[in-house]
Image (cartoon, rainbow, N blue to C red):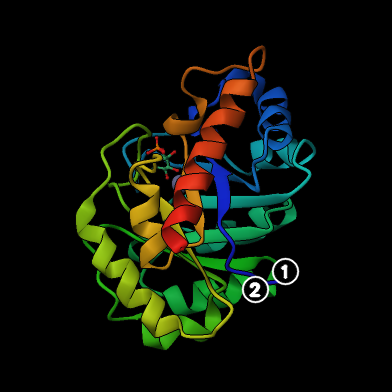
Amino acid sequence: MFDRTIKIAPSILSADFANFGAEIQAIEAMGADWVHVDVMDGHFVPNLTFGSTMCAAIRKHIKGVMDVHLMITPVDASIDAYADAGADIITVHLEAGPHIHRTLQAIRSAGSKAGLALNPGTGLEAMPYVLDLVDLVCVMTVNPGFGGQKFMHSQIDKVRALRAMIGDRPIHIEIDGGVTPQTAPLVAAAGADVLVAGSAIFSGGSVANPSVYGANIMQIRKSAEAARG
Ligand code: DX5
Ligand code: ZN
């Protein structure tokens, strides 16, 4: 069921890479709505994480939505592998290849929901031509590649314009990068409903002390919901 309530999606990029299973169980127990999984190839972005085999392994630990953010190029040949790994949503970058229309179609054909991510330097010009092919648009509020970067306020107007374009279509607006209790209200007020956060959720906590994760999730959620009015 589609809804526009605020959803918090911790990015496991900031979790303990040697302990993903326990980290995922901890954030879900502490109130995470979705689990955001960052796949980086050291080519499209200057950082390398893991691939579809790891996604399949961590899928077993996720009770809710597995939100896979592919920062890889080329991407088309890998879509089926991530769908088979159990990704509920597969998000690809507009900048990652010449055939975004075909790529989005391929994601839905493979049985996942289709997300489209836009880098901070990318505009909304293509959106009218792909709106019917997407279930989610991810507005990057940092340049992709690393956690812990500073939120770009320049992206807030893009979120507002995107929200107007979407109208009553069942398309989520996700924000990725620099989300904190301070920045979450700005994008929630502009129309975002899915808030990815890595460092703001994982810093200070651990699987041994997961209540910190819970407090961080709660703070981001409350500040975003307050901005919605
Ligand atoms: C950045 C990733 C993000 C990252 C966000 O390329 O796509 O999901 O983990 O990290 P924070 O919340 O620390 O900016
Ligand atoms: Zn991400």
Q: Which mark is residue 111?
A: 1
**Ligand 1 quarter of the rendering:** top left
Instruction: State the residue at coordinates (61%, 30%).
Output: 214
Q: Amino acid at mark 2?
A: Arg
Instruction: State the residue at coordinates (47%, 83%).
Output: 131
* Label 1 residue near ligand 2, CB within 8 Å: no
Q: In this view of the protein, can residue 57 be seen by the observer? A: yes
Residue 167 is left or right of residue 153, and the answer is right
Give the crowd class for mark 1: few <14, some 14-19, many >=20 residues within 10 Å: some
Residue 139 is left or right of residue 212, and the answer is left
Foreground pick, 74 / 71: 71
Q: CA distance from mark 2 to mark 1?
A: 5 Å
Indicate the position of residue 79 as horizontal and vertical percent values.
Answer: 60, 60
Q: Given contact means CB atoms under 8 Å apart, are the residues at marks 2 and 1 in contact?
A: yes
* Label 2 residue near ligand 2, CB within 8 Å: no
Q: Amino acid at mark 1?
A: Gly
Indicate the position of residue 224 as horizontal and vertical percent values.
Answer: 46, 52
Q: In this figure, which residue is indicated by the disc labeled 2? A: 108
Foreground pick, 122 / 165: 165
Q: Which mark is residue 160?
A: none
Tag 1, which secondary structure? loop
Q: In this view of the protein, can residue 139 be seen by the observer? A: no
Picture quarter containing residue 159? bottom left
Tag 2, which secondary structure? helix
Q: Looking at the image, which residue sits at the far top? A: 208
Indicate the position of residue 132 as horizontal and vertical percent values.
Answer: 53, 86
Indicate the position of residue 138 as horizontal and vertical percent values.
Answer: 43, 61
The N terminus, quarter of image: bottom right
Q: Is residue 219 above or below residue 222?
A: above
Q: Is residue 158 above or below residue 85?
A: below
